[in-house]
Amino acid sequence: MNNCIGCNHETEQNWCDYCQLLAPHILEISLESLGLGESDSENLCAKIGSPSPSIPHVWKALANSQKPGIDWLSIGKNKDHSIQQWIVEPPRAWTIKPSQIEELESESGIRNSDTLRDMHRGGILPNGTYVSFVEDVFYLDGNKINLPYRDIEKMIRMPGADKVNWDKLLLSLHLATANCQPRERNPSQVLTPKKMISHPIAYSNIHKNARMRNAEWNDFLGHGYWRTDPYEEIATFFNKNKWVFSKTPWMKSWMGPERNGSIQAASKIVPMSLLIRKGRLKILVRRSQQWRTIRVPNDPEIWALLINWSLIRPGHPDRINLNMFQQQLFVDPDIKLMKEKDINGINFLREIVNNNDRAMIMLGSSKSGNQKENSIKVQGTSGEYYKISPGKEAHRTRFRVSTIGSALSFRSPNQNRRTTQLCIVEAPALRKLVIGDAIGSIVLALLNDLDSQKQIYTLSAHLRRLDEERSPVTPEQGLDDMRRLQRLVELARR
């Protein structure tokens, strides 16, 4: 027997059943992506000089370490991109003034016409790449991008800035900071932990191969979640600039020789890593028992390395390096993974389910390669079955409740099971509890659903509807219904 990594409960696996259910939503990341492999963590730590977990020490160690796979960052020796052939005078150098930054970051945005005109005009980076600002968006050589303008303004003044391939760096960075949140397409879709995002290359591959024309993708787009679909924007951006990325290590990792150069399939969901906030590049890291965003140093080589790790194919050793870097190198190894109150919440739910014959935990199998949903199954005093799944739902509720039929529907093979989502919104008092306590409270309520319907309107409405469906129709009611139908037919013929 082992002790669970999360709650220290005895288990035959690394994680107990209840941590497999709740830990991804407490830690806000999938357990597979948590980066807890000791050998992997030690290898990365040793490669960069075994720094202490302080932020300055880790960045200094990474800056001084070898950074394989960033050759694409430098302009080739035989190419001098700083010398351009212009018919007229070359454009001015790009810059952004403190007053322009102040206006840009204000609530009202840029209103001054002189500022707008100056930023529209733009300028060139040291290698000749053109940057401009139009309709509240930065453009790089005609491509709409996320630009860390505060960082770039400083970096282009550093020694060696004219040898940096700025267009390739910033176009790659735009992909790495896309951070599109996965959307559940139907009530049976697995609820994704908060810090997990859709890998931009995986979804770009779907778009390129026209898979969006099949029923699943049309169902996804047909819900109208976005007037402008971010997946389509990123896919279009990627396919337009694919030639720029062709020789980068992260792009090569997706190209299988046995696939004649086509992009290989891979996991679509990965942990969030890089992001841009107020003109600065940041990275999400685990500090103590919570996530924090910290600034990435203004070093093009560090940027290139992190972009490689971020965009590389899931499962690649460099992607594992990124998981380790984010989740292990900035953490004191003596601090527990989860807070004590979260562990108590997990144990509370465990005690409720283990001590009740009408409740059980259901863990999805991943043998088929598809993501499965972990949940608690409950039978109420009404005979109805319910499924409670953790995850962010509407109205900031941290779980989803579905009805999955009655005892009769499970016994009868000819009886269709009803699977409908039951809207139960967390009350303010429940929202103050940790997720284990909150779901435990809902399990107790649904175990006694006949009494709980007095406080939960949607549950009451569902049980009333079931009673109406189960009520037998008398011969007199059937005759009355037939007469009403005949009258409607006669009226329609007139």
Image: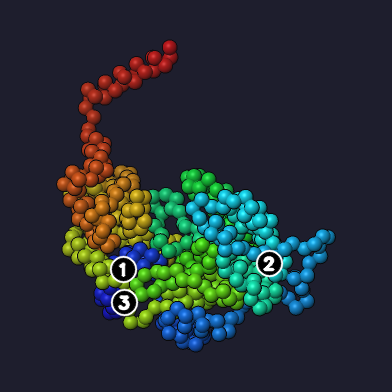
Instruction: Point out the frontmost of discs 2 and 3.
Output: 2
Residue 40 screen position, x and y as percent: 46, 81
In terms of depth relative to the viewer, which is nearer, 12 or 483? 12
- Residue 281 seen: yes
Farthest right residue? 87
Q: How far apart in space, not on screen, are marks 3 and 1 (Cα)? A: 14 Å
Sequence order check, earlier mark of 3 and 1: 1
Mark 2 vs 3: CB contact within 8 A = no
Image label count: 3
Sequence order check, earlier mark of 2 and 1: 1
For numbered disc 3, what is the local secondary structure?
A: loop
In terms of depth relative to the viewer, which is nearer, 453 or 234? 234
Residue 379 screen position, x and y as percent: 22, 52
In terms of depth relative to the viewer, which is nearer, 442 or 475? 442
In terms of depth relative to the viewer, which is nearer, 390 or 97? 97
* Badge 3: residue crowd in 10 Å (few <14, some 14–19, many ≥20): some
- The residue beneath circle 2 is 125
Q: Which amino acid does label 1 sit on?
A: Cys
Q: What residue type is labelled 3?
A: Lys
Q: What residue type is labelled 2?
A: Leu
**Residue shown at 28% from the left, 78% from the top:** 3
Badge number at residue 334: none
- The residue beneath circle 3 is 336
